[in-house]
Amino acid sequence: MITKRREKTKDLMLYDLLVHRMDFSIKDRQTYEKMKQGYEGERRFDQLFDETNGDSLILQDLLFTHNNTTFQIDSVIITADTIFLLEIKNYKGDFIYENDKLVKMPNTEIIQPLHQLHRSEALFRNMMLGFKYTLPIKSLVIFIHPHFTLYQAPVKIPFVLPTQVQSFVQKLHRNSTMNITERHHLIAKELLNHHISQSKFRNVADYHYDELQKGIYCRNCKQFFDIAYPERKYLVCAHCNEKEDVNTAVLRCVNEYKILFPNEKVTTNNILDWCAIITSKKRIRKILRENYEVKGTKQWTYYI
Ligand SMILES: [Zn+2]
């Protein structure tokens, strides 16, 4: 049973929009790729639980602050007799385990996920001392990418390799069937009460309206439409032939504008400039009026 679902982080949402409208620095591109890959891996793991309907309680993507330290856990699974803390890694390629280090072959040492997880586990354990109920805690690193290979991993290391993930999930379900009680639900509830929202943490570099490309891009291939269509009902992509209703395309852009510039008002002029290829002010105003609540009057009109 999924008690808390993972959502795309605000940072990833911003990057997903910005990538079409600006040139990223090398650092931003790397951060974005890493974030995107991590999220895809986590979602791939989540889907295994969507497909199997077990009794264990699943809490995805939790963030806590304890003893002035903030720590995040990719998935917490409460089974009948154990609380599993899972760190999900979407690494791809050949890796070797040497002297407690993880090395991407041939020779790039990467941060050992176990160290990170042990630190989180210690904080988690400590936090749970204040809870009414508890259970034994076990931490594991899940390697989810099908093209991940690890050489020389000791048998007892708490790693779940791609070929073991499926049976690991099934085992969790088997262990918890029929044995989840009120006590387990209370633990989940306490964890949720301690969970803090991600919104405070933003890693995306500053961006400015002026440096973003204006216009509407195709919802399918993400290429910008380069011709103005003053009277047409549809936009048709010159690259992939995707056809989209102008109203829907404009609303998609308004939505983007609202996410990227939450402090700016949605006005006819702002959206006219943002969409760029729809040159009729009347048309933009009509779309906004039909889909949003009108606030203010005359030149001070805006939409929410
Ligand atoms: Zn297209």
Image: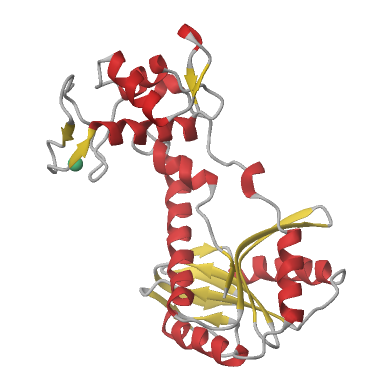
Can I make out residue 119 in this image?
Answer: no
Question: How many marks are shown on the rendered structure?
Answer: 0
Point out residue 123 in the picture as x, y percentages from the top left corner: 78, 66
Closer to the camera in the image, 10 or 86: 10
Residue 291, percent across and down? 40, 31
**Most distant residue in the top direction:** 299
On the picture, is 7 further left or further right than 286? right
Q: Position of residue 45 (x, y in %)?
A: 47, 71
Considering the image in quadrants, where does the N terminus appear? bottom right
| 111 horizontally vs 45: left or right | right
Residue 144 vertical position relative to residue 294 in the rendered view, above or below: below
The vertical placement of 14 against 83, above or below, is above
- Residue 227 in the image: state x and y as whole percent: 16, 24
Left or right? Give the position of 144 relative to 3: left
Q: Quadrant of ligand 1?
A: top left
**Residue depicted at 66% across the width and 50% down the height:** 197
